[in-house]
Image: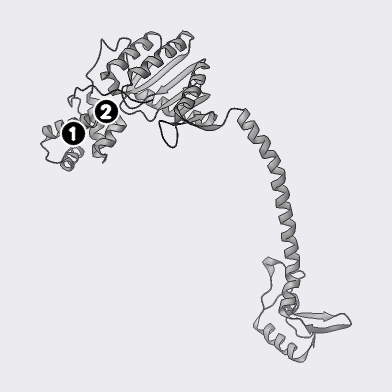
Amino acid sequence: MCTEHDQVEVSKLPELCEDGLKRYRDVLAAGGTTADGIPDCLVDLGLLRFLPDHPGFLTPVPPDLAAAALSRPIKQAITEHQDTLMAIRATMARAEAVYAEAQQGGGTSVRVLSGASVIAAALEEAVQSCREELLTAQPNGGRSPELLAEALPRDLALAARGVKQRTLYQHTVRAHGPTLSYIERVVAAGAEVRTIDEVFERLIVCDRRTAFMPGPHDRRQSALLIRHPSIIEYLVKGFEQAWSRAAAVGEAPSRLRPPPLTNETRRAVLRLMVEGYTDEAIAGRLGISRRTVGTHVQKTSEVLGSRSRAQLAYLIAQTDLLDHSDLGAVEEEEPAETAP
């Protein structure tokens, strides 16, 4: 059934019913008709139109002309909306320029630094301006003597200024003489140092206002300089969670040196092996050599009598071996870090 419409809208476009099509065909043949019994859809769709000089008489209209008449207000509305959209874009473009300037001037940007010299200069400036707290996470085991010699006077100067320093290393630094000597000096000056099996990522945070982390491409030649408060807050939370699980290093680590690779490290190796990591991936995550990973796996295989890696993973998963207090230790001094 056709319905009456005072005004045709896109969402209320009347349907051309079968009776309407039949009557439209008859009117086309006759050249016109009276309004008696004419379906409303023909008039609403503009297919029949009243003649101004003959009230009550309808003349047929070609469908393309009827469609043009129906489309005209819609096209006009679209044009008006397009003009409004352009005005919105133009207005907001002016505001966007002000916003971008404020973001940059307010120090809340994230920048990519490329090149070792550029990174070193930005890091030196940030650390020198540090007044309250310096948080550092250093993965990949012991650091090279050259890097330690460069870092020591800077960190001692920070301690002398009263800057609170906290540094996270991996357990393997406890077997690295140069790093232990460095730790002894900075701890004696008031810094705190802890070790953990895995450090989530290299990170430096100055006064919780500026942070540095590896960049998206070449990790040795690219770094992110972060000044966005929300991102820094997220990174600090990750640091604090790792710090709470880490083991403290005392004031004289060289005199109280524990076994280089403790039971906890062996557990970490076996846990990652059970999870399917390769020796190379395990070594990278724990900051130890592939040879040390292999030694841990081999020693555990001998204890359990397994003949393959798959069998060893199965035996470990089926027992509570990783909860045992004594898994033995493998003494090996890890190679020093070779790059910043």
The answer to which of marks 2 and 1 sits earlier in the sequence is 2
Where does the image place residue 242, in percent across and percent down from the top left?
Answer: 38, 26
Residue type at mark 2? Ile
Pointer 2 residue: 288
Write down the quadrant of residue 135 in the picture: top left
In this rendering, does residue 59 appear at all? yes
State the image coordinates of residue 214 (x, y, percent, origin top left): 43, 31
| In-image side of 69 versus 177 (left or right) | right
Residue at image position (50%, 24%) is 122
Q: Quadrant of the N terminus?
A: bottom right
Disc sitting over residue 247 in the figure = none
The residue that appears at 26% across and 31% down in the rendered structure is 268
In depth, the one of 16 and 110 nearer the eye is: 110
**Image label count:** 2
Residue type of the residue flagged with mark 1:
Val
User: What crowding class fits label 1: few (fewer than 14 Cα within 10 Å), some (14-19), or many (20 or more)?
Assistant: some
Q: Is 96 displayed left or right of 279 in the figure?
A: right
**Residue under circle 1?**
297
Q: Above or below — where is 226 with respect to 192?
A: below
Is residue 145 depicted above or below 312 in this figure?
A: above
Q: Quadrant of the C terminus?
A: top left
* Label 2 SS: loop
- Residue 164 drawn above or below residue 114: above
Is disc 2 surrounded by few (<14), some (14 to 19) or many (20+) residues within 10 Å? many
Q: Nearer the viewer, residue 26 or 76?
A: 76
Where residue 188 sits, quadrant-wise, is top left
Q: Position of residue 128 (x, y in %)?
A: 50, 16
Res 54 quadrant in image: bottom right
Q: CA distance from mark 2 to mark 1?
A: 13 Å
Q: Position of residue 21 (x, y in %)?
A: 68, 84
The residue shown at (35%, 18%) is 146
Q: Along the line of sight, which residue is nearer the eye, 14 or 218?
A: 218
